[in-house]
């Protein structure tokens, strides 16, 4: 009897690491110390010593049940982007620059090619936000997970000068809300998606005219990483007063997180075109509109609040970063919360 007979293939683990290296190499930053495969990842803070008060910000998350889609479609090269996005978008919300990322993959059986493909997506996400992939773990769990399944989670660390933290403290009535478009459902609400649509290969391969692609292609579209767009806004001299990443809980849970007591956000539904996937989901599932806005991003993945004088510069910066955006509402005096009208 040995470890392999017990269900854990150490040699497969070594092979996975070798296959990953080419993807990880492309994410390296000058601050990364040491090579790949050590017990920990080292990252120099030398570059940030000139900040007045360098402040670390962190985020951790997973992909949720969207990962079931990857199993059904046998497509594993984009869920890593989702994982990175869910972590670094939260860091960017605080005004932080993502520095490094670590991933954790738990699997029923280590298939080196599949694991490397997953990590290629993680590496792509890191490239998109400028973070280094400095470590990770692949854990084989025979008997705990089915052989063909896995779960993916990650952890990111970023830095910001304390004076540049986005806190919402100076938010006031009259400030304008600019919504940055999402790529679709992103990585939230898939438990409901899987109740509305039959999760079979036939269903996912069904082409919808209103989507312009198959259901599966639409749903697995990776989450947009907003780091460059938010950096572009700051770099053009605009002060982002408050920021909200529209993730699980949709508008009703996430928008109030950017507000202080005494102000409310008013968002106009007709200020932009809600993507077809949400209309299809609502229609097919008979889902109440409030539930939709309390579950999904409805086409807006990130919201920033800026001074009215900075709206044009903000939108130009977002578009220069390759994203679409809209003026979707404003801040008013009143009880803390969000009104969608």
Image (tube, grey):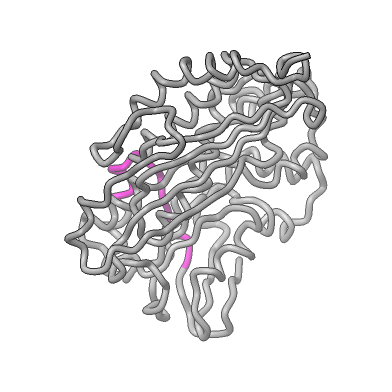
**Magenta segment: does it hold 183?**
no
- Measuring from the top left, give residue 137's x and y in whole percent: 55, 33
- Measuring from the top left, give residue 149's x and y in whole percent: 73, 26
In this picture, residue 325 sits left or right of residue 31: right
In this picture, residue 225 sits left or right of residue 200: left
Number of numbered discs on residues: 0
Q: Is residue 325 above or below residue 107?
A: below
Extreme residue toward the left, this view: 50
Q: Is residue 191 above or below residue 335?
A: above
- Measuring from the top left, give residue 72's x and y in whole percent: 73, 22
**Magenta segment: does it hold 326?**
yes
Image point 53% across, 17% down: which residue? 14
Q: Is residue 266 above or below residue 98?
A: below
Extreme residue toward the front, this view: 1
Image point 51% across, 50% down: which residue? 301
Image point 47% across, 66% down: which residue? 329
Q: Which of the 4 image quadrants contains residue 118?
A: top right
Per the rendered image, the range of residues in magenta is: 316-329
Front residue of this view, candidates 102 and 207: 102
């Amino acid at each position: 009897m040995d470890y392999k007979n017990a269900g854990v293939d150490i040699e497969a683990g070594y092979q996975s690491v070798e296959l990953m290296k080419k993807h990880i190499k492309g994410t390296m930053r000058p601050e990364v110390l040491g090579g790949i495969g050590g017990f920990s990842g080292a990252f120099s803070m030398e570059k940030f010593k000139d900040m007045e008060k360098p402040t670390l910000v962190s985020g951790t998350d997973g992909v949720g049940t969207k990962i079931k889609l990857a199993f059904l479609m046998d497509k594993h090269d984009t869920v890593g982007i989702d994982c990175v996005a869910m972590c670094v978008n939260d860091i960017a919300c605080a005004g932080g620059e993502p520095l490094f990322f670590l991933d954790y993959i738990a699997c029923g059986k280590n298939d080196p090619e599949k694991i490397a493909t997953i990590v290629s997506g993680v590496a792509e996400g890191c490239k998109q936000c400028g973070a280094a992939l400095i470590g990770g773990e692949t854990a084989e769990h025979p008997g705990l997970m089915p052989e063909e399944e896995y779960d993916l989670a990650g952890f990111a660390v970023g830095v910001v000068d304390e004076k540049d933290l986005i806190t919402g403290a100076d938010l006031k009535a009259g400030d304008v809300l600019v919504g940055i478009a999402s790529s679709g459902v992103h990585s939230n609400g898939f438990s409901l998606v899987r109740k509305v649509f039959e999760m079979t290969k036939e269903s996912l391969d069904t082409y919808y005219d209103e989507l312009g692609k198959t259901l599966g292609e639409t749903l697995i579209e990776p989450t947009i990483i907003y780091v460059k767009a938010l950096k572009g806004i700051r770099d053009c001299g605009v002060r982002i007063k408050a920021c909200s990443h529209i993730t699980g809980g949709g508008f009703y849970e996430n928008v109030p997180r950017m507000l202080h007591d005494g102000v409310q956000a008013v968002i106009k539904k007709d200020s932009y075109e809600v993507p077809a996937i949400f209309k299809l989901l609502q229609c097919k599932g008979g889902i109440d509109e409030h539930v939709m806005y309390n579950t999904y991003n409805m086409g807006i993945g990130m919201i920033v609040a800026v001074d009215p004088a900075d709206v044009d510069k903000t939108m130009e910066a977002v578009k220069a970063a390759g994203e679409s955006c809209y003026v979707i509402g404003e801040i008013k005096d009143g009880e803390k919360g969000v009104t969608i009208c």
